[in-house]
Image (cartoon, coloured by chain):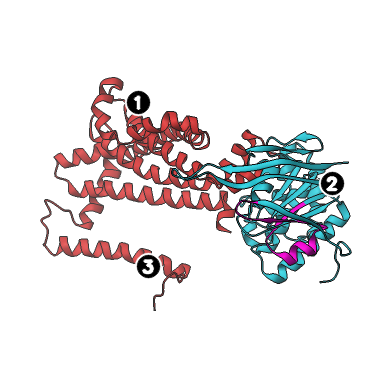
Chain colours: A cyan, B red
Amino acid sequence: MSALLISGVGRVFPGVRGGKPVTALQPTDLSVPSDDFVTILGPSGCGKSTLLRIVAGLDRPTSGTVTLDGRPVTGPGPDRGMVFQSYTLFPWLTIEDNIGFGLREKGASAAEARETVAYYVDQVGLTGFEKHWPKQLSGGMQQRTAIARALANDPKILLLDEPFGALDNQTRGLMQELLLGIWERQHKMVLFVTHDIEEAIFVGSRIVTMSARPGRIKSIIPVDLPHPATTR
Amino acid sequence: MIRPFQPVSARARVALGLSFFALFVAVWSVATFGGFVSPTFLADPLTMLADGWFLLSRQDFLFDIGMTVWRVVGGFALAAVLAVPIGILMGAYKPVEALLEPFVSFSRYLPASAFVPLLILWAGIGETQKLLVIFIGSFFQIVLMVAGTVGATRQDLVEAAYTLGARDRGVVARVVIPSGAPDIAEILRLVLGWAWTYVIVAELIGASSGIGYMIINSQALMATGQIIFGIIVIGLIGLVTDVLFKAMNHRLFAWRFA
């Protein structure tokens, strides 16, 4: 049974030009059991992205620890897949090579990588675009590739930092359903950061609300709707 | 109507490009054939061509061209092979940058041409000296510019690679280098152009072959037609190299131009 345990994690940024240090995140506790789809909801500046980056290992907490399956997080790793708000596909790699990036890094055999990549290309509906460069794709398609790239590594947890923030409303709705569909089939832990209340309720089975200055968790609310929600 | 950023057709592009060369030759012809400039100081286009033919057919000028090209390419390749990896290390690893950056920045301002007398003392007047002038002129520039490009690698791509399980060396090999490669190629194209300046300087002093040697000889003979022919040959070689470089970049880095 895998689980993510965040205990006493806080982040203070040093003061800029002699200013006071800024507390981005007060010491925070949160546990995410396996299979759970948790959304972290809050206004900008509430430390939700900081918390996600700490879980990803891209930022270090000034206090507290994060453990995944009992192993402390000390840096980024393939067990925690991340999807960023900005488009972070490697522009020099085709869609299929982007999705296969982690597999190659892991040393998977060519046949195995090909099979996994083909599976995820299909899962995110990008069949026919395998040989395209990222810049030839729309924003929604790029984020679908980014999700596939993270999932192809078979991470224990998927971390999403406002992944659909830059997309138009219609595309965003489709992407949310796509993500939920994948989650239903794979049942991974998901930590999904957003500032959109509707999105938080629609995709999450639990909502962690945060407030700003200083960033802290305000409440943890289970979503009392059949999950995943099927109608909007 | 010309409007900002509107593209032109391929035919119009070629026609416009050629027409400026035509204008250049026309102005030159008017100035020389019209008697506005004394032939002692500036040869007319026809004299230039005749002098060029004389050089090629009688003076074995092709050998001089070959010597110069070999010096440029040799010195430049030597500089690039050493400078690009050092630049990548400097850009990616901050302690290496802290160690080398001040010295390289200092060395970059040392004019390669000022080293010519020293290099003659150290390396004689043979090929080594010519290659060294070009090497000194190119090496530090390439190091600094490559370091700058690599230092500007998109950090979100680096972070994405780490979350996909890449280790430090993987990040350098599979993110930093491919993302910087098109700009590094562009830097090499630019510096190769500068290398042509250095080779001529190197050949003006203490050489017995090469385009620069021919030019300094022609000065003594007041053969301005030959000098201009030599300069135009350099320009043409530069133009051809540029076109080849660009075509190669389009092939190698198709993702940039897709």
Label 2 belongs to which residue? A33
Going from N to C along the chain, the mark reached first, 1 or 3, is 3
Label 3 belongs to which residue? B16
Residue drawn at x 80%, y 44% is A156
Badge 1: chain ID: B
Left or right of B13, for residue A131 = right
Q: Residue furthest bottom?
A: B1
Hey, what amino acid is under mark 1? Answer: Thr
Q: Can residue A188 be seen at all in this image of the molecule? A: yes
Q: Quadrant of the C terminus of chain A?
A: bottom right
Q: Is B113 in the magenta?
A: no
Frontmost residue, A121 versus B247: A121
**Quadrant of residue A112 in the image?**
top right
Hey, what amino acid is under mark 3? Answer: Leu
The residue mark sitting in front, 1 or 2, is 2
Residue drawn at x 37%, y 30% is B103
Q: Residues within 10 Å of mark 2 (few under 14, many from 20)?
A: some
Q: Which mark is residue B128?
A: 1
CA distance for labels 2 and 3: 68 Å
**Quadrant of residue A64 in the image?**
top right
Chain part drawn in magenta: A191-215
Q: Is A211 in the magenta?
A: yes
Vertical comparison of A16 with B110: above or below: below
The picture places residue B72, in percent across and down from the top left corner, at 37, 37
The picture places residue A119, in percent across and down from the top left corner, at 82, 53
Name the secondary structure under disc 2: strand
Residue drawn at x 34%, y 37% is B68
The picture places residue A208, in percent across and down from the top left corner, at 75, 55
